[in-house]
Amino acid sequence: MPMSHGSCASRGTPQIPLSIHAMEGTVEILSMVQISATSRHCGLRTGLHGIEYSVIHHPKGQLKIWHTQLLDSSPKMEAWSTTIWTSASFTTTRYYDEAPLDEFGLQREPKWGHLKDVHRALSLCKRALFWGVPTTLKLGPDQQAIVWQQPGTSACAAFLANNNTRLAQHVNFKGQDIRLPARSISVLPDCKTVVFNTQLVTTQHNSRNFVRSEIANKNFNWEMYREVPPVGLGFKFDVPRELFHLTKDTTDYAWYTTSLKLGRRDLPMKKNVSPVLRVASLGHGIHAYVNGEYAGSAHGSKIEKSFVFQRAVSLKEGENHIALLGYLVGLPDSGAYMEKRFAGPRSITILGLNTGTLDISQNGWGHQVGIDGEKKKLFTEEGSKSVQWTKPDQGGPLTWYKGYFDAPEGDNPVAIVMTGMGKGMVWINGRSIGRYWNNYLSPLKKPTQSEYHIPRAYLKPKNLIVLLEEEEGNPKDVHIVTVNRDTICSAVSEIHPPSPRLFETKNGSLQPKVNDLKPRAELICPGKKQIVAVEFASYGDPFGACGAYFIGNCTAPESKQVVEKYCLGKPSCQIPLDSIHFSDQNDACTHLRKTLAVQVKCA
């Protein structure tokens, strides 16, 4: 990899090979670490927005050791936020919500704490990494060690890797028997003490909660205004224009209109036969109207943008009007020849006529960029006064909905839940918060995204909300929620190493900060909140994940009482993983290595 020319690189910072595995055990995260012995501005760092953080897949049994890239140490946060408007095609506004900071700016644990522990563990190794010489040792068929030793000194750091993807292994390293979980790396800053393992997460977990706002949803009343499909637009061309070029990223929408005259002999003679409108499009989607009536819609996908719309329609003798609303859902995101990415209708035919198939692709098409509601700025307070709003009925395609809500209580992040809606856009006080597409389902048959972030900066004491529904949604179940991560958890077993935060280096040697280095469950409430309830506690063999823990075959009956004693009413607490505290006199599972799983509520 090429060296960057920042302040750290110019000082000849050493390169450190290190390979860190993901906690899920399915991918390997390559930590591109910047360390400088000469500048306090250069530190350990990984990030999602640069080359210093990458994810790759490896063949079974193969361990890759990558050298670090030297990077300039400009401030960077490993986070993601909401993409309000010009996101990549077929990408939700949430986009990437798995970073240590989620789209609402809340710390996602254990990723946030696990990353801090990675940094701390490497910092404890820095003397050996700065001045040491690396040596690779084979410890087994799929196990190896990379040892950094400074010649003539005791400075030593070791990274023990188990690349077996299924089984934990015991290895003998410098006379010690060390257990390595499957597909993991253990960090030993003094070549003796394990302070970190990539699979054994000692930091706390949390679960995100969406809480319905009482204030914001108190007087939520809706009004509606329906768009009318245009007829006989100007800006005419023989064929429909390409959609990206036509809209120029000023809107998602463009109308295409044409008309054709049919005689009685052109129409099907049989009552059970209807003409079929077929539109072959390059993407991303269309809504079709025939003689003012909604005929249906179709769209492509992230994998295949092009699609074919085909629907039976009702045509009449005389002049017939066809209007196609082409829409985009983002811009091309990557790849070569982006100037050759096209969208919009390309071939339009009518099948099933008595006189045969009629190709109307070159029938002469009128164009309009955007829809009327956008031109009138119906999403603003002033623009919304330019049309007559009515009480909502059963809804329908291409309908605007307007309502007001009060700012939610508290200072937690805010989101809107689009229950009952199809596809469209949302504006808050005239500012777009992006597209929604609730009826675009994942393989699990659930919406790819249901909650949409409303930045607090957009809100006033009283707020105008405007929805543009393209299909047939009903806003009666749309509601405002606040977001928190007040459900926090910890799951620690007897085989977990002590936290690297319990160690420090003094005079070149690793020393513990405390006398008791046994594993412990640590819980810290966000902000200035306190632990108000213990929702789950089990000392035994519990299973599950934060927000969904379950008691296994063995559990100490006093588990919840012990946790309540240590934690209730406190902003943080530590629970020792020791059978003495959980009454081991009647332990029916002495053969098991115990795990303590705790879930608490902060408020």
Image: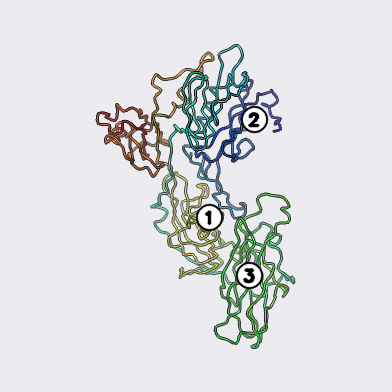
Q: CA distance from mark 3 to mark 1?
A: 30 Å
Q: Outermost residue, top direction?
A: 152
Q: Is residue 575 above or below residue 446?
A: above
Place of residue 97 in the rendered image (x, y in percent of width and height, measured from the top left) = 52, 45
Which residue shows up at 70% across the image and 31% down it?
A: 4
Does label 2 or label 1 sit earlier along the sequence? 2
Residue ID for mark 2:
67
Q: Earlier in the sequence, mark 3 or mark 1?
A: 3
Residues marked 2 and 3 touching at CB (< 8 Å)? no
Q: For mark 3, does the 10 Å Cα neighbourhood hold few (<14), some (14 to 19), or many (20 or more) residues?
A: many
Q: Is residue 478 above or below residue 130?
A: below
Kind of residue at badge 1: Asn
Instruction: Tell me: 276 left or right of 201.
Output: right
Depicted 592 relative to depicted 374: above or below: above
Q: Nearer the viewer, residue 380 or 360?
A: 360
Q: CA distance from mark 2 to mark 1?
A: 49 Å
Amino acid at the residue labelled 3? Leu
Does dot 2 land on a helix, a strand or a loop? loop
Q: Which residue is label 1 attached to?
A: 429
